[in-house]
Image (spheres, rainbow, N blue to C red):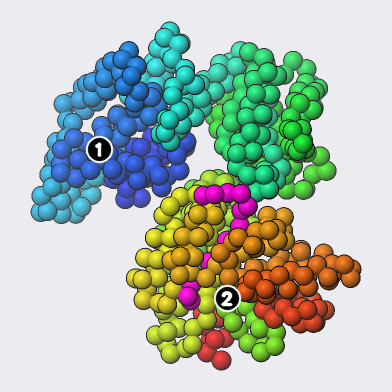
Amino acid sequence: MTHKEKAVKLLNEKYHCTQALFGAFANDLGLDLKTAFKISTCFGGGMRCGNTCGCITAGLLVLGMTFGFYNSSDTEQEAYGNKKTEEFIGRFSERMNGKVNCRDILGKDISIPDEMAEIRKNGLILKKCPAALEVSIEILEEMTAEYITYKAETSIAAEDLPENDELQTMVKRMGRSNRFSRNVSALLDKADKVAFIQFDIRRFKIINDLYGENFGNEVLDHVVRTLRDYCNDKQYYLNRRSDVFVVVTEIPDADYPMRFIRELDARLCQYKNVTLQLTYGVYIAEDKTMELRRMEDRATMARRTAKSGRSSSNIVFYKEQFKDSLYNIKFIEENLQKAIDEQQLSMYLQPKYSISKNEIIGAEALVRWIHPERGMIYPNQFIPIIEENGSIVQVDHYIWRKACMFIRKCIDSGIKPCPISVNVSRVHLRGDESSQILSDMVRSSGIPGKLLELEITETADDLQISRQTSLLKDSGFTLLMDDFGSGYSSLNVLLESPFDVIKLDKRFIENMMTSDKGRNILEHVLQMASNLDITVLAEGVETKEQIELLRSIGCDQVQGYYYAKPMPEDEFFELLKK
């Protein structure tokens, strides 16, 4: 969608004009919508008093973040920024016939309750505000194009700005992204054939877990240095996010993309004593009038196909049959918020059982998306997508609230409630808000905190995640280490972690059952956990044979299809009543 289409869509979804305008540019600025809304709400407070139009407020914020007018030590840049600010307001006033205040545009004052009621009754926001949004976006797009020339003339480079806080880091990244887009657009105009090559590092998360984030950052620096040395001045590259990189190059002959990738791969595949496995997706730009994002989306789809294991090669070229998957990604990204608002997302619960007592001892809360037209959309179809774009946070919050409400329902119905565990993703643990959010949910629901348990995939050598995990433990939550034995966790983690329960990964159990040695390893894990006063729960249990083995080595708590599949919360409620 264009900036205008995005802004009008957000306005129709009841976001105010500051949020709608800034949200329309969120992608360009490297922000997810939630963060963009927070920022724009802070800066757009003035519009609530009926003063300056929120489109001006948001427009100046976009200008500042796009052009980097925050570095006051650069007097030339600051002077240019002040000039551009005045210019934006002047252009807006001219095109809006002097109307720069909300009361002028709407004809009513939103700070007066009676007039605000009239605004809502007559739908004036949807009638009047789109014009101001469109004018603002037109001006921003014009000024961005003009700024390209200014930067070329003054040689202001985002990389030269001091990187001393998160905002500057974000602005620098956005500046690189803008220059990349401009260079690629110019290349598409000049070259006959162009290839979009997107690649990532397979299992990069495990590299971070095993060697620490500092080493992971060294690996990313290694990739950037290699690209800088390897690419010529007509080949453009960008670190799109984390370990995902994109290179755009002219194609002199049909075999060139494969030659380019193989030589690049040979340079990248080893860093210090660690072997790096890379996955590549390639899109040959046939229709060069297509939007850049759509071209790169096709390279993304090819990369994901290579990564999924559906291909025998680590290099996959985009094919038209990938379109269904591409449309699926766009469908999920564009419909998720509506799914949350309209409660299309449902909480399913999978019981946890005691083998010896043959009774329910808890349940894990899982998400299912039941779309009114598509029907059931399973987690493996949308969770990877929303994990990558950051929307997983909204979905997790939704399920956390549903779990608290379910526990409250059990208490109010006189049913003995069992603990419900919810997933807390790494995204939550990167910030400092999760503990407070969870505590507030528990408190507002009026439920005992011990009944809401948290499942976390532990990350070794990650100080931020370890700190947040300890904070959650100190707040009184029971912590479960998810996927133990999947490659993310080790026995050493148990010695220092605050976890109360470890969940043995399904594949770990299956592998351990193949030999006497494997059984011995399982027994030692159970013994060590017992010595540390940590409970062990086996997940993914599906057969009688697995039950008997687990019973024989002293593992009493299990979860899996042998006892029950995930079920709607009403069905689980009836099961508890019995």
CA separation in Å, label 1 and label 2: 46 Å
Query: 228 or 116: which is nearer to us?
Result: 228
Q: Could you tell me which secondary element the residue under label 2 belongs to? A: strand
Query: 96 or 48: which is nearer to us?
Result: 48
Which label belongs to residue 17?
A: none
Q: Residue at x 18, y 49 (%)?
A: 119
Farthest right residue in view = 515
Residue type, label 2: Ala
Query: 218 or 277: which is nearer to us?
Result: 218
Q: Position of residue 308 (x, y in %)?
A: 73, 48
* Residue named by callout 2: 363
Q: Could you tell me which secondary element the residue under label 1 belongs to? A: helix
Left of 51 or right of it: where is 486? right
Residue type, label 1: Gly
Q: Position of residue 128 (x, y in %)?
A: 23, 40
Which label belongs to residue 54?
A: 1
Q: Work out whether 57 lies above or below 97.
A: below
Check if residue 451 falls in the magenta segment. yes
Q: Position of residue 93 (x, y in %)?
A: 20, 25
> Around disc 1, counting alpha carbons within 10 Å, would you say few (fewer than 14), some (14 to 19), or many (20 or more)?
many
Q: Nearer the viewer, mark 1 or mark 2?
A: 2
Q: Work out whether 426 lies above or below 518.
A: above
Q: Residue at x 34, y 37 (%)?
A: 21
The part of the chain drawn in magenta is 450-464
Check if residue 321 falls in the magenta segment. no
Q: Position of residue 533 (x, y in %)?
A: 62, 74
